[in-house]
Amino acid sequence: MADLWQSQRIITTIADLVRRARLAGTPVVWVRHQGPGLQAGSEEWQIVGELMPEPGEQLIEKRFGDSFAETTLDDALAAVGASHLWITGAQSDFCVRSTLFGALYRGYDATLVEDAHTTADASYESLAFSGEQLVALVNKLAWTTRLPGVASRLCKAADVAFSPAERLDDDDKLEAIEAEEQAEEDAEDVAMGLGDPDTDA
């Protein structure tokens, strides 16, 4: 976390989400990566002090970006009856992105907490990207992804609702937002000459 974009703010935000989840009785599952620069037992591999698992909380060790790949994460989620995941952490363009899609492809609804993940600056060939830009890109991927039978969602930490009653209200809001998005897409199709969405077969 030391060299990542706004790391201390992200740590504080995640810590507050974890506290709220515990108070609501929502299971918290931790994932830790091993690999080059994150050797098991090294200082870099340790979970930061503000984010420590409590006794009884699952800690999954992984070696690939997708937290489900060759781990027991699926079993751990099944054991607590999870069907919807709130995803936070680092790094946005690697493990967070891979785990978001890994969850969706395995049939989980997944919400990326847009202000609770981070990454480092990066470059590819002649292009340079700031950590902030990469976070924004992954947020856009979460917001615009549509797959059959599952929901990919995006929300701010302050809007995460862990209790059943809050989730029901949140789902009502989501339906209204998705309806508005669909109306905008239909309007864009008409504007580009793709036809009338009400009459196309």
Image: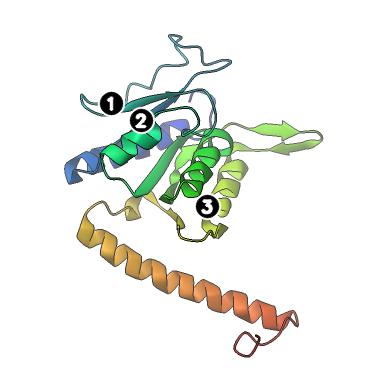
Q: Which residue position holds label 2?
A: 30
The answer for how far apart the CA atoms under marks 2 and 3 are is 21 Å
Q: Position of residue 72 (x, y in %)?
A: 39, 29
Q: Which residue position holds label 1?
A: 53
Mark positioned earlier in the residue sequence (1 or 3): 1
User: In percent of the image, x 61 and y 79: which residue is there?
Assistant: 186
How busy is the neighbourhood of tag 2: few (under 14 within 10 Å), some, or many (20 plus)? some
The answer for how far apart the CA atoms under marks 1 and 2 are is 7 Å
Mark positioned earlier in the residue sequence (2 or 3): 2
Q: State whether residue 150 is above or below residue 94.
A: below
Amino acid type shown at disc 2: Trp
State the SS at label 1.
loop
Q: Position of residue 18 (x, y in %)?
A: 28, 38
Are discs 1 and 3 less than 8 Å apart at CB?
no
Amino acid type shown at disc 1: Pro
Amino acid type shown at disc 3: Ala
Are discs 1 and 2 less than 8 Å apart at CB?
yes
State the SS at label 2.
strand
Is residue 161 rendered to the left or right of residue 8? Answer: left
Q: Which numbered circle lies on residue 142?
A: 3
The answer for how far apart the CA atoms under marks 1 and 3 are is 26 Å
